[in-house]
Amino acid sequence: MEEQIKTTFTNQKAYFATGATLSVGYRKTMLDRFASAMVKWEKDICEALWTDLHKSYEEAYLTETSIVMGEIRTARKKVAKWSRKEWKMPKMAVLPSMSCVVKEPLGTVLIVSPWNYPVQLLLAPLVGAISAGCTAVLKPSPYVPHVSQVIADMIKDTFPEDYITVVQGNRDVNALLFSLPFDLIFYTGSPAVAHTVMEAAAKHLTPVVLELGGKSPCIIDRTANIDVAAKRIAWAKTLNSGQTCIAPDYILIHSEVKEAFIKAFAKQMVVLHGEDVKQSCHYVRMVSDKAFQRVSSYLAQGRIRYGGSTDANERYIEPTLLDEVDLDSPVMTEEIFGPIFPIVTFEDKDGCFTEKVISFVNSRPKPLALYYYGREKTGWEIIRHTSSGGACINDSVMHIVNTNMPFGGVGNSGMGRYHERESFEAFSHRRSVLITPRTLDLPFRYMPYKLFGLVRHLV
């Protein structure tokens, strides 16, 4: 395996060195191939997602394949514009020279994806790599073996291996890949593994894009529309059974509306998934027995106000509201990545709910997302005084849907960003170029600086 991976890496470096990927025409052709492959393999992809995650076709389409297809269509339409030289106004000090920025591909890149959205989080970054003109090694997650195999078969059927290929394996394979001098590592996963990625990348000064996670707070003020908030939050928390990097992780709620929210949340569960959530064809299961054991252990760390049932044989955990939690317990310090929803209540006798929420959020690592329900003015105040990768006012998760905006983390939740043009930029180097005439040569920059007085006014 080690020799095979090293050979793959060497062959991709050699293929990139031929310059075959540099032309915009080549990139468009490969994007067209990619789009055709997504259509051809959609049925197999969706069946594999059902097998590995119990993910329905509708959810697979909305959260996986349609997002990748949207990225491909946008890149195909705009890659020529993105790739153009950007001419910059020259400063007086460099006249008569002209200046421009050219976009060049970084080279041979590694894209490593997690299991929770195994299609979107592997193939959406690949769109950026293709549009930028890179070659790419893809490493899917072993925790979704059927999906990973379908993607490997699709990529092999679509692209030359020296251009794009899939490498499968466990953590040992990851470690080997991280040790190679790629021109960029694009990693989506946990902050814990991200430390390993950065440590390995540092040995070669390899740049990294880290799309991580964290504990994204969901703030519910007394000014919130509780019924609407409960509907949007219940959907966001049960999407992929909470196994979403930007899922609302815990609730910070005004004491006056807590009981109303709990009732509204329970009502919305029935609307979304029926009287028995377990029987819903749209409710995903935990990815593994290990994940089931970890997430279900949180149920003992508070008072269950809604839900709480489990089935180990099916790796099923009912959406659960957990009250009276210890702020230092694992459910409040670890990323849950499941359908358990701890509630932290703030009494507001002194009228300082906003200040208390801001203080609480800032006392913890920066999250990938922050959600606020209530008056828009207060939402902007909270956003101004906190930090997160992204945010929504009176909504959850939906900011990722607008791919015209960059998506990425900050601090503990990641670095770098992507989606559409940002993806192209992530896999590109913006190279500054100065073009000077061969004959006209102004004397002011040369020793012994006879025109120094004039130069001081120019620079």
Image (tube, grey):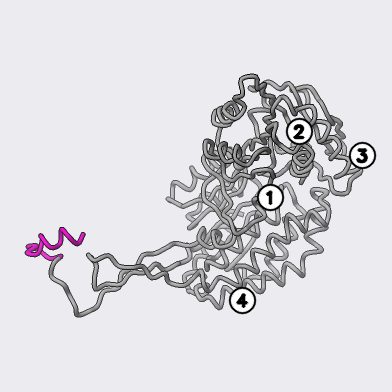
Neighbourhood count class around disc 1 (C-alpha, 10 Å): few under 14, some 14–19, many 20 upward: few
Where the C terminus falls, by quadrant? bottom left
Q: Determine the CA span between mark 3 and mark 1.
A: 26 Å
**Marking on residue 340:** 2
Q: Determine the CA span between mark 3 and mark 4.
A: 48 Å
Q: Secondary structure at mark 1?
A: helix
The mark that comes first in sequence, 2 or 1, is 2
The mark that comes first in sequence, 3 or 1, is 3
Q: What residue sits right under mark 1 in the picture?
A: 398
Q: Determine the CA span between mark 2 and mark 3.
A: 17 Å
The quarter holding residue 290 reads top right
The quarter holding residue 87 reads bottom left
Neighbourhood count class around disc 4 (C-alpha, 10 Å): few under 14, some 14–19, many 20 upward: few
Q: Is residue 163 left or right of residue 449?
A: right
Q: Is residue 437 above or below residue 186?
A: below
Q: Nearer the viewer, mark 3 or mark 4?
A: 3
Front position in the image: 415 or 256: 256
| Amino acid residing under circle 4 | Thr
**Residue 241 visible in this rendered orientation of the protein:** no
The mark that comes first in sequence, 1 or 4, is 4
Decide whether residue 105 is among the magenta residues: no
Q: Is residue 125 above or below residue 283?
A: below
The quarter holding residue 412 reads top right
Q: Which residues are magenta?
A: 445-459
**Marking on residue 276:** 3
Where the N terminus falls, by quadrant? bottom right
